[in-house]
Image (tube, grey):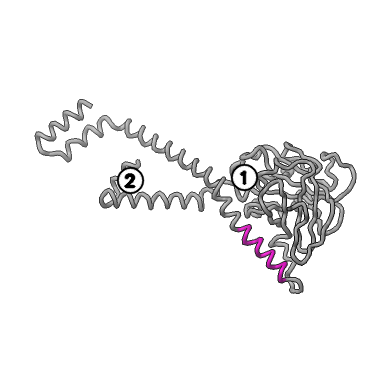
């Protein structure tokens, strides 16, 4: 999978490494900004109130 | 391995290096490819879960503290300059600050409501549901009930287990310092136990009406299985002076 991505990146090894880092950062950004905030309330880690529901 | 070596040898002999290595990879590799993709997906899942932990325990704190600081500054500005101006009692920005020396986390802004959205801003919220909190500023007898996160999103009540009987809890408003003393701790209770929020929280051992404060959060740390409850009773109210000198409990 990652090998396939690596082979399909343009340029030489250095350019590919840089593009890879940008891709990784983009994925981390999407996770932190959108995916995790969405997933967090669905997981039972952070309910702090008492209620009768 | 043998096949590969043979192929490489052939390729060298025939001077056709590009097409030659391809067939063996396809032939022996379908299962190998599937296994390697599966393995990479597992590694990826592990990394994503690791990142989620980083997000929950670190990044949400960064975001929440930033927001709470900004909001707290706004409240203080309001207090400083809003003596005569309208809107000086904007409860949406926060009604005051909670100081709990035993938790060693500075001041915690208190806002209205205990919804996820409010608590995620790194503040403590006073209950409006299922039992309405009695604000100390009202002067009425009742229970000032608060909730805040144990971990992540500012983790304002992370050290709630450090609170012991006799420890002070100070609530600061524009005009007064409300000094409470912890008198009871319930280290574990059901999340459905709304009795702890009652005007006279009997589980704390008290039977008579008074000016109480209740802190609730989740326990054990990093989970939400149970609730941790700390009760305090109002000891005295001290007027805020010109320099906002904190009461001696906060020294």
Residue under numbered circle 2: A5
Residue B79 position by quadrant = bottom right
Secondary structure at numbered mark 2:
helix
Residue farthest to the bottom, as pictured: B85
Front residue of B147/B98: it is: B98
Cα separation between marks 1 and 2: 37 Å
Range covered by the magenta-colored residues: B67-81
Front residue of B27/B234: it is: B234
Q: Closer to the observer: label 1 or label 2?
A: 1
The quadrant in which the N terminus of chain B is found is top left
Can residue B74 be found in the magenta stretch? Answer: yes
Left or right: B159 with respect to A18? right
Residue B110 position by quadrant = bottom right
Q: How many marks?
A: 2
- Magenta span dominant secondary structure: helix
| Picture layout, residue B239 above or below residue B60 | below
Residue farthest to the right, as pictured: B208
Residue farthest to the top, as pictured: B2
Contact (Cβ within 8 Å) of mark 1 with mark 2: no
| Picture layout, residue B75 above or below residue B145 | below
- Place of residue B12 in the rendered image (x, y in percent of width and height, measured from the top left): 12, 35
Residue under numbered circle 1: B151
Front residue of B28/B190: it is: B190
Q: Are marks 1 and 2 on the same chain?
A: no
Q: Chain of mark 2?
A: A
Residue at image point 78% right, 54% down: B248
Q: Dot 1: within a 10 Å radius of its alpha carbon, few (fewer than 14), some, or many (20 or more) residues?
A: many
Residue at image point 17% right, 39% down: B19
- Place of residue B108 in the rendered image (x, y in percent of width and height, measured from the top left): 68, 54
Can residue B212 be found in the magenta stretch? Answer: no
Residue at image point 79% right, 62% down: B240
- Place of residue B168 in the rendered image (x, y in percent of width and height, measured from the top left): 77, 48
């Amino acid at each position: 999978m990652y090998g396939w991505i690596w082979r399909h990146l343009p340029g030489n090894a250095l350019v590919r490494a840089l593009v890879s880092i940008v891709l990784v950062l983009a994925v981390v950004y999407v996770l932190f900004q959108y995916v995790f905030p969405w997933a967090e309330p669905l997981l039972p880690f952070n309910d702090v109130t008492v209620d009768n529901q | 391995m043998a096949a590969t070596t043979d192929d490489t040898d052939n390729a060298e002999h025939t001077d056709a290096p590009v097409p030659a290595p391809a067939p063996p990879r396809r032939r022996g590799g379908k299962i190998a490819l599937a296994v390697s993709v599966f393995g990479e997906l597992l590694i990826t899942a592990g990394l994503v879960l690791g990142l989620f932990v980083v997000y929950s325990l670190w990044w949400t704190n960064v975001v929440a503290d930033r927001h709470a600081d900004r909001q707290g500054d706004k409240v203080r500005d309001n207090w400083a300059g809003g003596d005569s101006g309208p809107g000086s009692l904007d409860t949406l920005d926060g009604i005051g600050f909670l100081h709990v020396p035993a938790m060693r986390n500075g001041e915690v802004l208190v806002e209205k409501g205990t919804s996820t959205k409010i608590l995620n801003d790194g503040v403590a919220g006073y209950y409006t549901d299922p039992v309405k909190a009695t604000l100390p500023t009202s002067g009425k007898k009742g229970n000032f009930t608060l909730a805040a996160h144990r971990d992540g999103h500012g983790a304002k009540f992370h050290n709630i287990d450090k609170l012991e009987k006799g420890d002070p809890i100070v609530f600061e408003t524009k005009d007064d310092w409300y000094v409470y003393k912890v008198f009871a701790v319930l280290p574990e209770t059901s999340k459905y136990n709304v009795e702890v929020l009652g005007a006279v929280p009997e589980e704390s051992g008290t039977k008579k009406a008074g000016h109480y404060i209740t802190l609730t959060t989740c326990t054990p740390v990093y989970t939400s299985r149970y609730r941790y409850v700390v009760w305090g009773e109002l000891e005295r109210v001290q007027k805020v002076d010109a320099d906002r000198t904190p009461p001696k409990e906060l020294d």
